[in-house]
Image: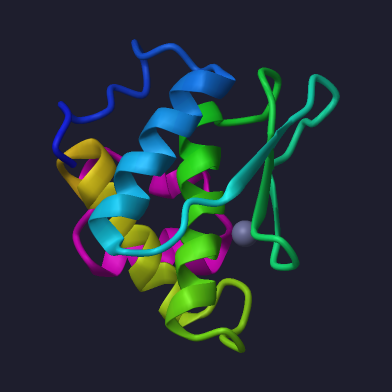
Amino acid sequence: MACPPLDTKRDLFSRSEVVRVFSALSVELGIPAPAIHWSERSRNGRYHVVGGVVVLGPNVWRRWHCALHEFAHHVTYFVARDAPSHGRVFREALEMVASMALGDAARYAWVSEYRSIAMHGRRRGLVR
Ligand SMILES: [Zn+2]
């Protein structure tokens, strides 16, 4: 990203910051930015293909990591619209998004991911 890499421990996790990061990533990738539905009640992120909506909120588990995971679903939709939810295309999109946003894909929380995604991180040497 043109801006400094995201620091998932220090950078404020707010709607406006998520909008800023998603916009920067989208511009760099040449895709429209997803819409963001910010919900206090949401504990898990979600991506709705229809309308390209990412659901997040101040209480989602893994916060920035969750946001990057959902953004990777958005990217996957543009790369291969029928790709399986957490399949190879998604995992590669997540690695690219993590690298772009965090400056190093190894800074992504691979170990707290779904098993197949955590395995991707390990295979790629991204778990330290
Ligand atoms: Zn997912």
Asked if one can make out residue 77 in the rendered structure from this viewpoint, the answer is yes
Asked whether, in this view, residue 49 is left or right of residue 87, the answer is: right
Determine the image quadrant of residue 9.
Answer: top left
Image point 55% across, 28% down: which residue? 63
Image point 71% across, 61% down: which residue? 51
Q: How many marks?
A: 0
Which residue is more in the foreground, 82 or 87? 82
Q: Quadrant of ligand 1?
A: bottom right
Which stretch appears magenta?
A: 106-127
- The reply to whether the magenta stretch includes residue 119 is yes
**Above or below 114: residue 15:** above
Determine the image quadrant of residue 38.
Answer: top right
Residue 32 image offset from top left, x and y in percent: 46, 59
**Above or below 5: residue 50:** below
Asked whether, in this view, residue 45 is left or right of residue 69, the answer is: right
**Above or below 45: residue 40:** above
Which residue is more in the foreground, 91 or 39? 39
- The reply to whether the magenta stretch includes residue 123 is yes
